Image (tube, rainbow, N blue to C red):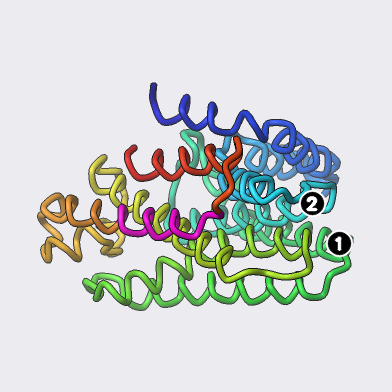
Amino acid sequence: MGFEDRYEKITECVAGELNLLKTLINEELSGLNSGVEKFDVMLTKFIGSKSKHIRPVLAFLYLKSKGLEVDEKQIKFQAVIELIHNASLIHDDVIDGSQLRRSEKSLNANLGNHLSVIGGDFVLSYVLKYLVDLGKIELLEMVAKTMEKMCLGEVKQYYTRYEIPTLEDYLEKTYAKTGALFCLALSGAEYLASGKVSDETEEFAKNFGTAFQIRDDIKNIVNNIPNGDIANGIYTAPVIFSGDITEPLAGVEKAKSLLDNYIRKSAFYLNQSDNVYKRALTELLELVDNE
């Protein structure tokens, strides 16, 4: 059984919540009426394209493992997370000049860079709308701080291209670019449910998000993705461990050990309950670690 099949099996216990999330996003975006049909169609298609929705899945499983309710507000907050993620993908593709996203033409390949930047900004307008609807100033502050981290992570990456970073700098950038949004997905969800955020939740999400990015970085090297990280001067864990941009595969095993370390750290912060959602989270950790 491959990654996709195993992942789908893991998400079955939150399929109802996931469908509500997809419906909310699709119904909102289906009402786009910019006056430019191609813009509306392409942006709607991009947001609605097949996705793992791994941040909301993680949040739904985590909340339910702790006996917390996933209500309409939780669905709306995870829509915020998905839209921030999608806006960042749109902008990333413009920056990288990527022509493909999720095995299909990227938004900038269809609309050009100028309209794609506007499209990403437009998606972020829905983020603001949902946050206003939720009426929690604390969530707005959390979102603002997270987006600041994400942007600064990208800025730092840009100005350190073609330099092999220290492992510490790499992990700091990895958290800023990827881990921070995972942390927001779970911390914001817990705040909505209980009015507080535990250290355990933040640590679980931070370590999982970092592990997830390390996994992607390893796959980028192993699969020799065209116009990938090395071609763009972005040197990740395998290059750091090999010390040589011409032989990144030499650092893959140590990068896998680093990934395993962050997965184990994440597992340490899971609550001690034994239910279907906790077991699904454990299976998800194993899947990310081994696929």
- Queried whether the magenta region covers residue 268, the answer comes back as yes
- Which quadrant, please, contains the C terminus? top left
Give the image quarter of residue 210. bottom left
Label 2: which secondary element: helix
The mark found on residue 16 in the picture is none
Q: Indicate whether 281 appears above or below 257.
A: above
In the rendered image, which residue does mark 2 sit on?
A: 76
Specify the segment rendered in magenta: 259-271
| Residue at 46% from the left image edge and 73% from the top image edge | 153
| Residue at 78% from the left image edge and 45% from the top image edge | 36
Q: Kindly check if marks 1 and 2 are in contact, taking CB atoms under 8 A apart as contact.
A: yes
Outermost residue toward the top?
Answer: 1
The kind of secondary structure the magenta stretch mainly shows is: helix
Q: Is residue 253 found left or right of 137 in the rendered image? A: left
- Which quadrant, please, contains the N terminus? top left
- Queried whether the magenta region covers residue 193, the answer comes back as no
In the rendered image, which residue does mark 1 sit on?
A: 134
Circle nearer the N terminus (1, 2): 2
Image x and y of residue 39, in percent: 71, 45
Label 1: which secondary element: helix
Q: Indicate whether 223 appears above or below 162.
A: above
Q: Is residue 26 found left or right of 9 in the rendered image? A: right
| Residue at 78% from the left image edge and 48% from the top image edge | 69
Q: Indicate whether 67 appears above or below 237.
A: above
Dot 2: within a 10 Å radius of its alpha carbon, few (fewer than 14), some, or many (20 or more) residues? many
